[in-house]
Amino acid sequence: MRAEKTQLVRDIQALIASSSSLFLMGYKGLKAAEFRALRGVLVAVGSQCHVVPNRLLKIAARDGGLAELGQADLKLDTALITGGADPVAVAKVLRDFARTHEKAVVKMAVVERRLCTAAQAVALADMPSRQVLQAQLLGLLLAPAGQLVRVLSAKAASVVYALNAYLSEKQKAA
């Protein structure tokens, strides 16, 4: 392999290694302005879009520990979307872009080193964002403690009510 291609494979490997999620999207037929618009929206969610040759992507994936991606059947033009702390946000951007641009197609994704099909990658967009999931988890974790506090305070309140009733009876008798 020529030195330029070897360097390009290393660059792709660095992109793969530094990202917890990758999305592959077909873009054949998109105009440059549409592709620029996609890149701008992806930057807003902390992602980058790179056009990479399929053969070099496969070599970089295979050598980078993603054997499944290295064996994937990639055809036509492929854009590699990397970065972004929240893969759900990236998936939402890609799904919305593909809805408005029929030539853009989500091919597959790699999330947490696991290969996802195109359908799974699009389904990822239907999930709540990371912040919403964290809030829901926190609510689930705090719910039992809140219930325990309410039960304990109810027991203490019933003791106070009983003592108060006893005192009022004593005062009436006196």
Image: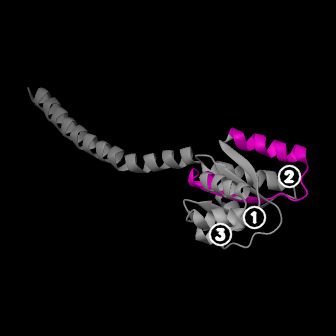
Closer to us: 4 or 14: 4
**Callout 1 amino acid:** Asn
Q: Secondary structure at mark 2?
A: helix
Residue 47, position as x, y percentages in the image: 67, 45
Residue 104 lies within the magenta run: no
Chain-order first, disc 1 or disc 3: 1
Residue 22 lies within the magenta run: yes
Measuring 23% from the left and 44% from the top, which residue is drawn there?
155
**Callout 2 amino acid:** Thr
The numbered disc on residue 54 is 1
Measuring 68% from the left and 58% from the top, which residue is drawn there?
6
Q: Nearer the viewer, mark 2 or mark 1?
A: 1
The numbered disc on residue 100 is 2
Q: Mark 3 highlights which residue? A: 70
Closer to us: 32 or 7: 7
Q: In this image, 45 relative to 35: left or right?
A: left
